[in-house]
Image (cartoon, coloured by chain):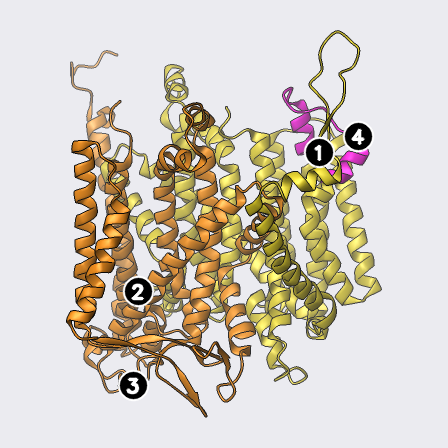
Amino acid sequence: MAAIQPSPSSNDLQPPYTRTTPLSWVLQNLFNNWYNTVFTLFFGVILSYAAYRGLRFFFVTARWEIVETNLTNLMVGQFPRNELERVWAALFLLGGSGGFIAGQAKQLSTQDPTSPPPSPGREQILDFVRRAWPFTILVLFLLRLSRSTTIMLLILALVALTGAGRLIGARIPGASPKRITIFALATACATLLLLLFNGPPSQEWGGLLLTVFLSTVSILASFPLGILLALGRRSSLPAIRFVCVGYIEVIRGVPLITLLLLSTILKLFLPPNSFDPNDITRAAVVLALFTAAYVAEIMRGGFQAIPQGQIEAAQALGLVPIQTIRLIGLPQAIRKVVPALVGQFISLLKDTSLVSIIGLSDILKVSRSFTSQDDFVGKGLTAETLAAACLVYWALCFTMSKESKRLEERLGVGER
Amino acid sequence: MTSSSGTHPPPWRNVRVLRAGGQTFFLLTVGTLIWFFLSNLSQNLSDQNLPTGWDYLEQPTNFRISGAEDFRPTQPVWKALLIGLKNTALVSFAGIVLASVLGLFLGMGRLSNNWLIRKAVGFYTETIRNIPLLVLIIFLYFAIVLRLPNIKEPFILFDTVVVSQRGIWLPWTEGDAIFWGAVLLAATAAGITALWRTKRSEQTGIPHHRVLYGAGAFVFLTIAGYFLMGSPVSLTLPEHSGRHVDGGIKVLSEYLALLLGLTLYTASHIGEIIRGSIQAVPKGQSEAANTLALSAFHRMRFVVLPQAARIMLPLLTNQYLNLVKNSSLAVAIGYMEITQITRLVMNQGNPGVPNIALLMLFYLVFSLCISALTNVLNQRLQYVGH
């Protein structure tokens, strides 16, 4: 049991120092009364068995050849193999500027006097591991399957570039939220240009590339629309309020799949013989319109949380309504809802799996198609392919949700 | 400011004129947009000679519905849609009940002082919440349910449950349906008894024991009714022979996978909601209950849970609505609920727009009704005063 040590001889009394031995910890946390003992034993057996089966599947019995052969398909679908440099270039661009942005953001937060002092190097590495372990597992899993030295070197170079970007970002002075936003937008545009300009036709896109592309484009497009809808819902003009409330409630009241089904007959609503949007555009439009309703509700929460005094002060200073929203309302609202927006992005990333139902080859559809290949048909390898898809989704979503929790603590949402 | 109009500003600076003008302009824009899409629609439909209107509801369906053996493909579309509605209701209701129970356990487990249970529930929650529900359902169906033993040599549990690839057979009752009406009556009587005990306790101050009285009344009335009606129902056990199973009730494998997926996914969210709302009750409340020497159970039952319920209610209904909407993911595994049937009807060459409009209308009416109900409940649950 816990042993209490004598307090030090100094005059100010320290709290009693309780030493936890492994045994006392086990007694306190697992066997502290009779029903906890029963629970521990009962669930201990079940969980050990489940863990044994799970780990055995992952490391021993699973035949990962099917994923190994199709690794490129899983990542990019039917993207032409002679154009893969585009994807790598885009990754390097994202890695470098992502690191740069992280460095600049770090600078911003150290300017903030309330932030904790910088921690030593070893702790930073530990912190990184704590934050990014799910994603690291995914990368290691994929590297293990690819067995290619070139890819490993490329990934190492990518990691090095990201680190370098972060160092440079932390050194270049004068970081500001505005500069970071402009830089991020420029990176996004450059990446899109790199992938789309004179590139392969959209029906050859697939796999993880398509999933990430659809969710990113949709959240970016839904953001402005969502802000407008939120403002409309709070407007004092009844007609505008009515239309916005109607849109938000209708979209939130129906499942996404019905909207995707509607998108398959979208062509009927466009002028005859005009342009015919391809599958990916249609899906992106529907996902953006769908997400906009949810973003609008999140933004409404953010606007509602702004103290009325802020708006009154802005009016007293003689700002017109647009200036009040742009300079006073939006910055404070966005700061409040960033974690919720990340949550919405995670749920959008998961929802993109629904586009496989209307025939797009996202990561789910691609992984399910492996089992019908000549080499693997009828061998019962569904669990392996779906487990690989699950792992990709899980690593991405889990990393983001951890980051969003951290951001929430950093921004002190609900505390100010 | 040398305006000659005195108290009236000119119209271009008059707020009332500006507001009216702005709204008119906005409505006109939205109306034009809608008119644009609808006129394109009618133009396209007439150009391409596509079927329009609601006549298709009376046409024969032309496909079979698994799980509804007495449905014939010659029966009209609206009957198929009704079966779809019934199947949506079946899976949603069972899902809501199971997810609530599992979610309650998960929420309590995450607050447990047992390290193992806390960590296991945390691991479960973080895993399930970060995988798309669609992938989960497909995984459960193709990698687990379809890998169960073949119907020729099923897995039989205690001679009462037959488990196979084609579905699961459970013991069920057969016999007079009137008996279930009598059970309903008994339940009503039990409810009235409980209400009576509550009222009496409030008037006289004697302990109410309403659960005991209510349950007693229910059990007594049910047993009395069973013997009075001369054993109207009996239990049937599934019996396996060759490729057939007779008796019992069949649970389709698609239903099973969908129900499992919806339950596991929604329960992980409900667990988090329950944990969050219990933690959101101010700590002072628990401490005050301790000071008053309430037992752990009474502290939970009379102090913490009633306050947590206020926070929980809107979040829980939101999850239930999500579950009903998510049941539409059945299209990926072919369970015949309303979305899947609509899709099959559309594939038969029936007009798409009215089909999808009907489908969206169904979900919308359902969501709005539940939201309205929640709002009423919410108002009654909130603190009175202030």
Residue depicted at 40% across the width and 23% down the height: A307
Place of residue A267 in the rendered image (x, y in percent of width and height, measured from the top left): 37, 67
Q: Nearer the viewer, mark 2 or mark 3?
A: 2
Residue depicted at 76% across the width and 61% down the height: A143
Q: Are marks 2 and 3 on the same chain?
A: yes
Residue type at tag 3: Asn
Tell whether A377 sits left or right of B257. right
Across the whole image, how many numbered discs are drawn on residues? 4
- Disc 4 from disc 1: Cα separation: 35 Å
Q: Are marks 3 and 1 on the same chain?
A: no
Numbered tag placed on residue A1 in the rendering: 1
Judge whether residue B88 is colored magenta.
no
Of pointers 4 and 1, the one earlier in the residue sequence: 1
Place of residue B89 in the rendered image (x, y in percent of width and height, measured from the top left): 30, 64
Q: Main secondary structure of the magenta part?
A: helix
Of the chain colours in the picture, the one used for chain B is orange
Q: Which residues are magenta?
A: A104-127
Q: Nearer the viewer, mark 3 or mark 1?
A: 1
Instruction: Judge by depth and name the residue closer to the eye, A23 or A56.
Output: A23
Residue type at tag 4: Pro
Question: Can you identify the residue that label 4 sits on?
Answer: A120
Q: Quadrant of residue A69?
A: bottom right
Tell me if I can see residue A220 in this picture: no
Residue type at tag 1: Met
Q: Residues within 10 Å of mark 3 (few under 14, many from 20)?
A: some
Q: Nearer the viewer, mark 4 or mark 1?
A: 1
Q: Nearer the viewer, mark 2 or mark 1?
A: 1
Question: Can you identify the residue that label 3 sits on?
Answer: B62
Residue depicted at 44% across the width and 49% down the height: B104
Chain under disc 4: A
Question: Can you identify the residue that label 2 sits on?
Answer: B89
Instruction: Judge by depth and name the residue closer to the eye, A295 or B73.
Output: B73
